[in-house]
Image (cartoon, rainbow, N blue to C red):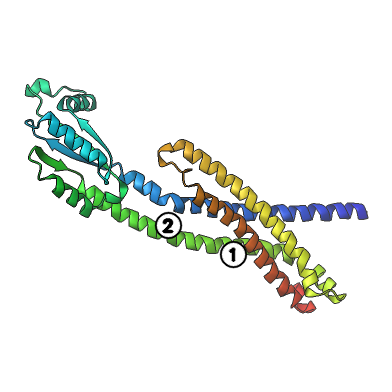
Amino acid sequence: MASSFDKYQKRKLISSYVSVVISIALVLFLLGCLGLLVINSKKVADHFKEQVVMTIYLNDTAKEVEVNQLNKSLAMADYTKDAVYVSKEEAAEYMKAETGEDFMDFVGYNPLKNSIDVHLKADFVTTEQLSEITESLSNKTFIEEIRYDNDLVELMNDNVKKITFWVLIISGLFTLIAVLLINSSIRLAVYSKRFIIKTMQMVGATKRFIRRPFVWKSVQLGIVGALVAMAGMAVVLYYLDISFPELELLTNTVLIAALFAGIFLLGILITWISTFIATQRFLNLKTDHLYY
């Protein structure tokens, strides 16, 4: 009979530990994923900014040496990610592929211009920077026109600022929620042993002696939960890197390692503090109040 009761108690204890580990792991995993988003938010924003194209249209009278010199100077400029020369013939073939019709059959000639498509580095994709670049290039007589979608640039920069602000706000709130959820799980685990705590105290055990095994066990659970969360984060990061290789999510190894270390330490710190506070509460509680 006693053996059966011991097995029941052991299963109940293991079930309690598993539920605490799962709670810690889920909360830390979600917090870690949010951290990955925060770390890579600038990289994602920069990726979309660098899709903006500034097109430089050239006069038909432009000499080949002038075009080549401009293309080389653009390629070496601080603001350029890449610069690609597009001839009027290539532009016509592209339009034909896009529309499915050859517009030159109706027009009788190719009205398009030779051009250079410039993808700018993300830091230069602002209205002010684009205006300065356009002004510096406009003094070349063989350049007919410079075009870019200024409305798109302004909208993109405004949205990046808004998204960054809200991501930071949500990160702060989620961190607070994570702490509260883990704290609740730990308090429930300690609450189930409140009579054991009070019994040990009544037979003369010191508060420090009583607290130590509870704190150590919770820290162990926090470590296990953090390791599970880190494994989940690694899987998510791996598949995101495969799905979006252009974002190069794994290049910033220092920040990623710091995030993983932070999640690990957070799992230990929150469980340690929560267990300390919870055990202290029951140690200071009168015996009559244990039933409430």
Comparing 7 with 241, the one in front is 241
Of helix, strand and loop, which one carries label 1?
helix
Q: In which quarter of the image is the N terminus?
A: bottom right
Q: Which residue is drawn at 9% across and 37% down?
A: 142
Quadrant in which residue 245 is drawn: top left
Using residue 201 as the reference point, say whether residue 271 is left or right of it.
Answer: left
Of helix, strand and loop, which one carries label 2?
helix
Q: Give amino acid for label 1.
A: Leu
Q: Name the residue under label 1.
A: 180
- Measured as percent of width and height from the top left, residue 189 is found at 72, 62
Can you see residue 115?
no
Label number found at residue 167: 2
| Vertical order, 205 against 98 (above or below) | below
Q: Residue furthest right?
A: 1
Which sits earlier in the primary sequence, circle 2 or circle 1?
A: 2
Q: Give amino acid for label 2.
A: Val
Are there few (<14), some (14-19), or many (20+) residues within 10 Å of tag 2?
A: some
